[in-house]
Amino acid sequence: MAGRVDGKVALVTGGASGIGRGCAERLAQDGAKVVVTDIQDHLGEEVVRGIGGEAAYLRHDVTDEDAWGRVIGEVKARFGRLDILVNNAGIGLGCPVTEMTLADWKRQIAVNLDGVFLGVKHALPLMRAGGGGSIVNISSVAGLNGAPNLAGYCATKGGVRLFTKAVALECAALKDGVRVNSVHPGVIETPIWTTVMGGTPGANEPPDLDAMTSMFVPLGVKGFPKDIAEGVLWLASDESRYVTGTELVIDGGLTAR
């Protein structure tokens, strides 16, 4: 089914690699005009070149509120509207809680939770002006279940889940046409594993995801960014018009045990 978001304007944060890149490319494939933001300029520009058409790249630190104002202003100037926001930018810092520095704790919160809050805050007025839209906040299975050595990461992703529900209810009460949902990826092959596991005792390199999934994931295989992107595309499209305030878990059955 091609063209499920044809003519819509999408903003994808952290779109230079991993899940963000997969989402940007998939939304563009189905007709969206995509704005990719990140702090990895070379990779972000590469993604936009690959997409072609009216895609655009903007450098963007999601923890900076002034930067959010500039990005949303640029989207409005270029396209006049915003229909889809994918709050994807995030970091993962693995470490036993007794060894985690306050600086690392605050950094994770700033990127993973503050960044989502700021995105929703600044995107909503433009979405409402256009009659509505879809906000998709990327959380994690770590936002549903705890995990050792990932206390900070779990705290931020759990926060994203409940923040999403609260804003969904606000928008529903206003009848503003904006739907807000969260997506919870499982073991997906992305660069974040380098830092998520890097601080775990005995881990000097990224984990063997194939071995991990074989042992812990019921389907027995790892996921890829395209698997998450398909779910995001559905939530961004009008096919999910009756879905808001919920979480879409894409994890090969990991949390079904």
Image (tube, rainbow, N blue to C red):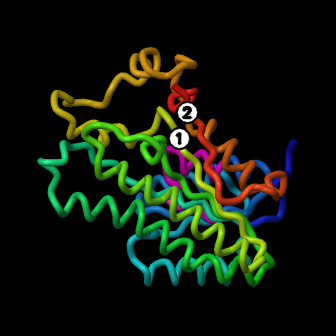
State the CA–CA distance, disc 1 to disc 2: 5 Å
Residue 179 point in image, percent of width and height: 71, 65
Q: Is residue 111 above or below residue 143?
A: below
Q: Is residue 2 magenta?
A: no
Q: Nearer the viewer, residue 59 or 130?
A: 130
Q: Is residue 111 left or right of residue 235?
A: left
Q: Is residue 15 magenta?
A: yes
- Where is residue 185? Give x, y as percent: 53, 40
Q: Residue at x 68, y 81 (%)?
A: 126
Please report the residue visible at 36 percent of the width from the left and 38 percent of the height from the top: 193
Label annotation for residue 30: none
Q: Where on the picture, by quarter, is residue 48?
A: bottom right
Query: Which residue is disc 1 drawn over?
Result: 185
Is residue 85 in view? yes
**Would residue 79 be visible to someone looking at this image?**
no
Q: As rendered, which of 21 and 184 lies closer to the eye? A: 184
State which quarter of the image contains the N terminus. top right
How far from the left and from the top, in percent, is residue 31? Answer: 80, 55
Which disc, if any, is residue 251? Answer: 2
The answer to whether mark 1 and mark 2 are in CB contact below 8 A is yes
How many numbered circles are shown?
2
Label 1: element kind? strand
Q: Vertically, is 29 above or below 245?
A: above
Counting other residues with Cα less than 10 Å from the Cα at mark 2, is it few (<14), some (14-19), or many (20 or more)? many
Which residue is at 69% across, 56% downward? Answer: 52
User: Is 165 or 45 nearer to us in this picture?
Assistant: 165
The image quarter in which residue 237 lies: bottom right
Residue 223 coordinates in the image, percent (x, y) = 55, 30
Find the magenta span and give its range. Answer: 11-25
